[in-house]
Image (spheres, helix red, strand yellow):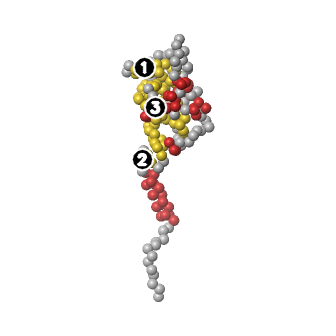
Amino acid sequence: MRKKINSGFQPIDEASQKFKVLRERAELLSKIPDPVSESGVSMNCLGFLLSDELYLIETRFLLEVIYLNEITPLPCCPLYILGIISVRGRIISVINLKNFLNLPDKGITNLNRVIVVEHNGIEVGLLVDDVVENTTVYKDQLVPAISTLSAKQKEYLLGVTIDHAIVFNLEKFLSDEKIIIDEEV
């Protein structure tokens, strides 16, 4: 008579193996990612809408978000310079990003917001349709561009997220001489 040897190996059926793999994946996906993880350096971003497209800017440039109130138009300025506003005693130029990026403009309503941003001493307000969300974006997960963007949009683009949100390069935008008007009338 042969003696049965217990090798410690138990056959696992295919269904329980799949269940085990799916449970391990679910546990991995449920973990909250660290600000700096295997996927690279993260950026905290504020999301806003322009002509039904979602844009993101880094919050490190953000000062505040306000409703558009009385605006004073400025003569002899490009169309994308909407005018100036007073925010607690500070005079801020407001740039209509839709006009600057050659996007369709539906007009201005009381639902529009002004995102006040600052970089290297330049403080401006960006007129947007609405502010929608804060999110974290990983730089190495951005794709360069999508074909539906205009050349002007691509010029100020950091990348596009997998959800098709356009990450706007605010640092490049605020350093561009096109937004600085130095004329006398």
3 or 2: tag closer to the N-terminus: 2
Query: Where is 43 relative to 105, above or below?
Result: below
Q: Earlier in the sequence, mark 1 or mark 3?
A: 1
| Residue appearing at x 48%, y 57% in the figure | 22
The mark found on residue 91 in the picture is 1
Which tag is nearer the camera, tag 1 or tag 3?
1
Front residue (pair 27, 183): 183
Q: Residue 130 location in percent, x, y? A: 47, 30
Residue displayed at 43% across by 31% down: 62
Q: Are marks 1 and 3 in contact (CB under 8 Å)?
A: no
Q: Residues within 10 Å of mark 2 (few under 14, many from 20)?
A: few
Label 3, label 2: how far apart the Cα atoms are: 25 Å
Amino acid bearing label 2: Asp
**Residue 114 picture location, percent across and down:** 45, 26
Element marked by disc 1 = strand
- State the CA–CA distance, disc 1 to disc 3: 22 Å
Q: Which residue is drawn at the image coordinates 44% and 21% (left, top)?
A: 92
Taking the view exactly as shown, the residue that stands out farthest to the top is: 185
Residue 106 appears anywhere in the view: no
Tag 1: Cα neighbours inside 10 Å, few (<14), some, or many (≥20)? few
Is mark 2 in CB contact (under 8 Å) with mark 1?
A: no
Q: Nearer the viewer, residue 114 or 154?
A: 154
Mark 3 is on which residue type? Val
Task: Please tell me which of labels 2 and 1 falls first in the chain.
Answer: 2
Query: Which one is in front, 77 or 20?
Result: 77
* Res 77 seen here: yes
Q: Is residue 49 above or below residue 11?
A: above
The span from disc 2 to disc 1 (Cα, nearest Å) is 39 Å
**In the rendered image, which residue does mark 3 sit on?**
131
Instruction: Check disc 2 and report the residue beneath it.
Output: 34
